[in-house]
Amino acid sequence: AAPAPSLSGLTDAVAGRLALADAVAASKWASGAAIDDPAREQVVLDTVSQLALDRDLDPAYVRNVFRDQIEASKTVQRGLFALWELPGQTAPPATPDLGPVRAAINEFNVAIVDELAASRDVVTTLRCPPELAVSSARSAAGAGFDPLHVAALAQAGESVCAVSTGSS
Ligand SMILES: O=C(O)C(=O)C[C@]1(C(=O)O)C=C[C@@H](O)C=C1
């Protein structure tokens, strides 16, 4: 088989994080919580900024990538809420406790920053956009994504290909 495209590790981690939006949405639907949680977003962005510094990556670059991760998660959550509001549709049963799914999201956050560090020499080149597209398609297929999740995965990758990633 052909070797995996170089950004596959990154897009697999991004897709894995995005797939957790389904469990987040089900939990929020069950509890009546709002999709937007600005305090949690701040914790995520501050955490990944520190992870970036630890890996000598530009924290502003990594924050931008994670703003897109958060927006992509909300795209999926809003899409699922819209679906569950339709007559005859039901949300899957879920517990209101977001703790376990957020712990899983935290693990993907670390994996994504690790992959950004591993891909630092690719993401600043013209190879990045086509490799990101191929890797995203591969990850989406592997995850069995529907059109809602495929669209959100593209949104999640919008800031990956960058001019510079260094912290200096
Ligand atoms: O943790 C949540 O409540 C989520 O919905 C996930 C997430 C994220 O992607 O990290 C997305 C939207 C919220 O505003 C906060 C965080």
Image: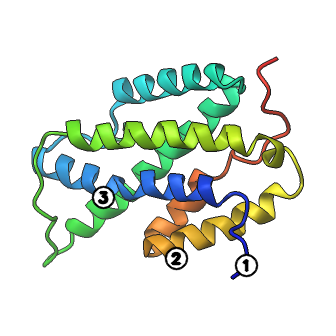
Q: Which residue lies at the image location 41% right of the left edge and 49% below the top edge?
A: 74
Q: Which mark is residue 141?
A: 2
Q: Which amino acid type is shown beneath numbered disc 3? A: Asp
Which of the two discs, 3 and 1, labels the residue nearer the N terminus? Answer: 1
Please state the horizontal and vertical placement of residue 3, each as a whole percent of the image. Answer: 72, 72
Which of the two discs, 2 and 1, labels the residue nearer the N terminus? Answer: 1
Residue position for label 1: 2
Tell me which colouring the rendered structure shows: rainbow
- The N terminus: image quadrant: bottom right
Q: Quadrant of ligand 1?
A: top left
Which of the two discs, 3 and 2, labels the residue nearer the N terminus? Answer: 3
The relative height of residue 44 versus residue 13 in the rendered view (above or below) is above
CB-based contact (under 8 Å), mark 2 and mark 1: no
Q: Which mark is residue 125?
A: none
Residue position for label 3: 22
In the figure, residue 128 lies in which quadrant?
Answer: bottom right
